[in-house]
Amino acid sequence: MSKYEAVIGLEIHAELMTKSKMFCGCRVVDSVEAAPNTAVCPVCLGMPGMLPVINAQAVEYALRVALALNCSINLHNVFARKNYFYPDLPKSYQISQYELPLGVKGWLDVELENGETKRIGIRRVHMEEDTGKLTHLDGGGSLVDYNRSSVPLLEIVSEPDIRSGEEARAYATRIRQILRYLEVNSGDMEKGVFRVEPNISIRPVGTTAFGTRTELKNLNSFRVLADGTDYELARQAAILDAGGKVVQETRGWHEGRRETFSQRVKEEAEDYRYLPDPDLPPLHLDGAWVEEVRAALPELPQAKLARYRADFGLSAYDAAVLTEDRAVATWFETAVSTPPHLNPKTIANWVINELFRLMNESKQSIDEMRVSPAGLVELIGLVEKQTINNNTGKEVLAEMFATGQSGTAVVEAKGLAQISDEAALTATIEQILADNAAMVERFVNGEAKLRGFFMGQVMQATQGKANPKLVNQLLGQALTKTGK
């Protein structure tokens, strides 16, 4: 690939999380779990004489995305018919947008693995309806489920600014994160509500003409997106090196063989014979309403990450982890703002290292688990006041996670309060030193590592409840006294 330049553009299709479909009143259902063809009507089945009506909520959701991606907004929108024949398209055309899409000329800054930030252009953001879902039978033939037909769909088309599978992954990951922040799409790739299709070509380094492109479909993870893209780049380079020509086609990814395979010849835009839909009048957006939607946008991930670093002093890694999911970020900020307003770094460490571990083990989300922001703050306070030590704090958090009890209640019920009575600890230390006179002698003669042994004996004698800082101090005094 050293003599070729990769030229990649991504088409992202995202179902919008409205309650009803794009052009009819049918409810939107889970296309994986719902019984086939139970959420359909004459409109989404394309019956003669049925007229579509635009879903206003879908328009607002689409506008949120276009604004978040820095697009210029077309106040005058036109829906078009995209004509092609396929079993999952009951009308034999798809209602989409072509010449006058909702948003154009956007951009998105993406952080790459090497630490660089790259700006990727966004050509268009437009609204359309989803198709039905085909299930191909082993013995031949196919079944069609039209529950998904006419579900509101947003297509986000990038400029061909992407140069590798890793860049494609980074861009698509960031787009999904933004859609989830905007609460317009769940980002579930396995269920097909978020689909990524790269258009891939190569050209000799230093040239500007585009090569013949192929499109990859049915990529169900970001890893597959990166792997499939890189494989296709290498495949095209091998063809050109051998004197062949790349065929313009749609290809799929075979996970078992880890290679792409031909599916069908890829159509050009003119093959779809776009024309304005005569059943849908042009959609005119009010400029004041567009600005209202813009003002109501939530703080987006990149801005939130920058604020966490500046205001909370978090590392780039910690800030990225905490802002990955909007619900986690909200939970964390609630904890930071809870009196007595603990150090955000301390809270971040507990969330990332302990709370996330418990969530991963139990497969619970931040909204499902039973530890509240105030509960974690209370627990950290117990550790900082030395009511319990750090290790006991982790045990208490696990109990809080399992039962929903407060940290104080767990400590009291299990008698976990830390022992900080100097007289009691001094007596315990003196007894341990007396019982281990030979070890003390070795310590005095230079085996400094035995100090850890004595610490362990004290913690064992107190069932782990001794204040380790105080034990360390008192033990040092006792050993110094013994060595004189």
Image (cartoon, helix red, strand yellow):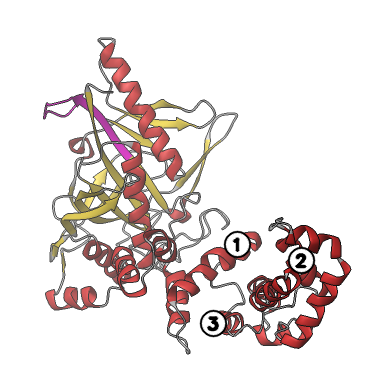
Residue 81 at least partly seen: yes
Query: Which residue is tagged 1?
Result: 357
Residue type at mark 1?
Arg
The quadrant in which the N terminus is found is top left
Q: In this view of the protein, can residue 16 be seen by the observer? A: no
Q: Amino acid at mark 2?
A: Phe
* Residue wearing tag 2: 454
The crowd level at tag 1 (other Cα within 10 Å; few <14, some 14-19, many 20+) is some
Who's the residue at 54% across and 73% down the image? 367
> Looking at the image, which residue sits at the far front?
484
The front one of 186 and 357 is: 357
- Check the picture and name the quadrant holding the C terminus: bottom right
Describe the element under mark 2 as helix, strand or loop: helix
- Check if residue 359 falls in the magenta segment: no
Q: Is residue 367 above or below residue 339?
A: above
Distance in Å between CA atoms under marks 3 and 2: 33 Å
Furthest toward the bottom, the residue is 339
Give the residue number, with chain letter if any, for mark 3.
Answer: 377
User: x%, y% of residue 22?
Assistant: 34, 62
Query: Relative to 476, does residue 243 appear above or below in the rendering?
Result: above
Q: Residue at x 28, y 21 (%)?
A: 247
Q: Which residues are magenta?
A: 198-212
Q: Position of residue 84 (x, y in %)?
A: 29, 39
Residues at marks 1 and 3 touching, judged by CB atoms closer than 8 Å: no
Q: Is residue 353 shown left or right of residue 415?
A: left
